[in-house]
Image (cartoon, rainbow, N blue to C red):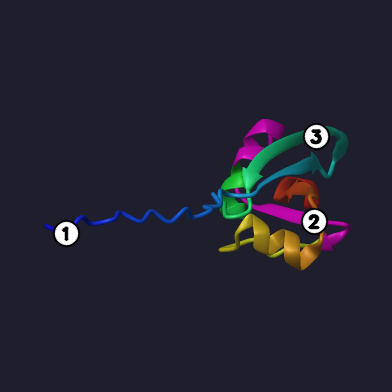
Amino acid sequence: MESQKLIVEEKEETLKGPSLVVLYFQRADNPNKTVAIKTTLEDSMERVISVAIKKLGLRSQSIGLLGEGEPIDFIGKTVGEVIKRYNTVTFQLSSADMLG
């Protein structure tokens, strides 16, 4: 009877979890009203904005997003895509009521 050796290879495993980021939102009509939201780069920007809208007390259905004074297209984008494209984590939210 031949004896068999069990060879165990040690593998270094790197756990890759979602990267966390903190986004800052402020009301365009009152920059003193600010909220910070911790999220992941893979999260939907639309979902994060909806949370910010509630926390900032905005009531309008139509919301505009600005980053560094530039309008931001966030529909269908992830948080990571928006950050990469516009190079900012600070945003201003404005409702249609504010814009007139």
User: Magenta span covers which residues?
Assistant: 51-70
In the figure, 20 relative to 4: above or below? above
Q: Residue at x 78, y 46 (%)?
A: 98
In the figure, 12 relative to 71: above or below? above
The x, y position of residue 18, in whole percent, is 58, 49
Quote the CA–CA distance across marks 3 and 1: 72 Å
Q: Residue at x 70, y 61 (%)?
A: 82
Q: Nearer the viewer, residue 25 or 53?
A: 25
For residue 65, which quarter of the picture?
bottom right
Q: Residue at x 76, y 48 (%)?
A: 94
Instruction: From the image, tell me which residue sits under label 1.
Output: 2
Point out the tag, 3 or 1, that comes first from the N-terminus: 1
Is any part of residue 63 visible from this angle? yes
Q: Residue at x 59, y 52 (%)?
A: 46
Q: Quadrant of the N terminus?
A: bottom left
* Residue furthest to the front: 1
Instruction: From the image, tell me which residue sits under label 2.
Output: 66
Q: Nearer the viewer, residue 52 or 21?
A: 21
Which numbered tag is attached to residue 34? 3
Q: Residues within 10 Å of mark 2 (few under 14, many from 20)?
A: some
For residue 79, which quarter of the picture?
bottom right
Say which of marks 3 and 1 sits in front. 1
In the drawing, does residue 22 fall left or right of residue 11?
right
In the figure, 63 relative to 53: above or below? below
Q: Secondary structure at mark 2?
A: strand
